[in-house]
Image (cartoon, rainbow, N blue to C red):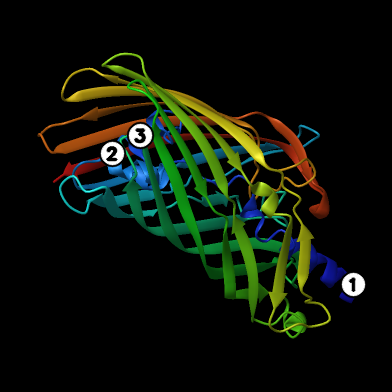
Amino acid sequence: MKKHVLIATTLALSSAMSYGAGYQLNLQGLRQIAMGGSGTAVPWDMSTIFYNPGGMTAMDHWQIYAGAAFVTPHTKYVESTGTYEAETQSQTFVPFSIYAGGPTSWRSPVSIGVGIYTPFGNGVKWDDNWRGRYVSQEANLHTVFIQPTVSYKFSEVVSAGIGLIYATGRMELRRAVPIADENNVDSRVELAGNGHGFGFNAGVHINASEKVQVGFNFRSKVNMDVDRGYASFTVPQSLQTAFPYTAFSSSLPMPMVTSLGVGYAVNECLTLQGDINIVGWSAFDNLDINYENNTPQLQDQSSVRNYRNTVSVRVGGHYTVSDRVAVMAGAAYDPTPVRDGYVTPELPDANRGILSAGLTYKPFERWTVMGALEFASSVNRQSSFDEGGFSGRYKTNAFVPAIGASFDF
């Protein structure tokens, strides 16, 4: 019995934070969302605080900027035999971005600003009684990065900037445990905790010619350390001593991202741009959960993740229709970092294609309102979570409408 309980708990917790894969959000700017997530080379507005701090000095005035996206993912699971299907429950998540910044004085080579944004997140909720309930019923990850930033213009050609990052976030997990009570009801475990971390965001912007701009950006890895989360077990009374309510500690990496972007002004109205993003997902090679109160049945956990680095490609175009209106369109290919054998229903990740479009409108001289729509779709992926003994085919789609506004001083 003890062995059975220990195994059940291991399965329940070993993937407790497998949010890890593919939880990066590329939704930190409205124009950039509309252009496939590209934005390293061309500083369209103060959202360049995130995409390339080196571009801040291209803004000759102060600007405040706010935007929000409405992410409604939907995943369908089909068992390998093809005789059972399940779908995630409908949920809407709202990552946001707020920026404020500008030159320290008229024609100053120094610009300062601050960005508050949500670069990582994930949320999946399955029915409580679905077939994969012992691997996951619900998982959520929320993060907020706060980034004070400074940028310096060395010449009319080269600018550079750097911002320090303070990150805060919260993770939550719920799943069933295959230990039934006298009424044949499953036991369950819930984990929740707040995490914090530090990092930086640095970039260089180059006006290579009248038509060509080049951008380089490096956002460092941020380890979100959960120093004191809490694990709660609902088990039969006879096992409550073996599974106490206890604190735990862990750490989840937000991976580094290296980006190279190029923008080309075809004419006065049309600009094309493209990015290559290298994401350091290999930082998530292992997951450890350390309980404050161990018992023979409840031991610290260590689980291999073995993620791989990825290279995504993003392209977009911006067309100025008039002094007040501009339209945008874009596309991207975003491969999964999750290797076969490590795909869980907490994050059923797969290679994704993205199409997007958007519009900006200036109702007044200093005001700009923005709207964008992104559609992301993964390939059908037949995969498994070997550690949990669970496999099947997943497919995920997501529509992401987004709105925002900026004000120029």
- What mark, if any, has residue 38 been given in the picture? none
Q: Amino acid at mark 1?
A: Lys
**Residue at coordinates 71% horizontally, 33% vertically from top-left?**
381
Crowding at label 3, few (<14), some or many (≥20) Cα neighbours within 10 Å?
few
Image coordinates of residue 240 in percent, x first then y, are 72, 82
Q: Residues within 10 Å of mark 1 (few under 14, many from 20)?
A: few
Q: Which residue is mark 1?
A: 3
Question: Tag 3, which secondary structure?
Answer: loop
* Along the viewing direction, whichever of 231 and 5 lies nearer the viewer: 231
Query: Could you say which disc has been placed on residue 58 in the image?
Result: 2
Residue found at the very far top of the displayed protein:
267
Residue 399 picture quarter: top left
Would you place residue 231 above or below residue 49 in this image?
below
Q: Give the SS element for disc 2.
A: helix
Q: Which residue is mark 3?
A: 157
Among numbered discs 2 and 3, the one appearing first in the sequence: 2
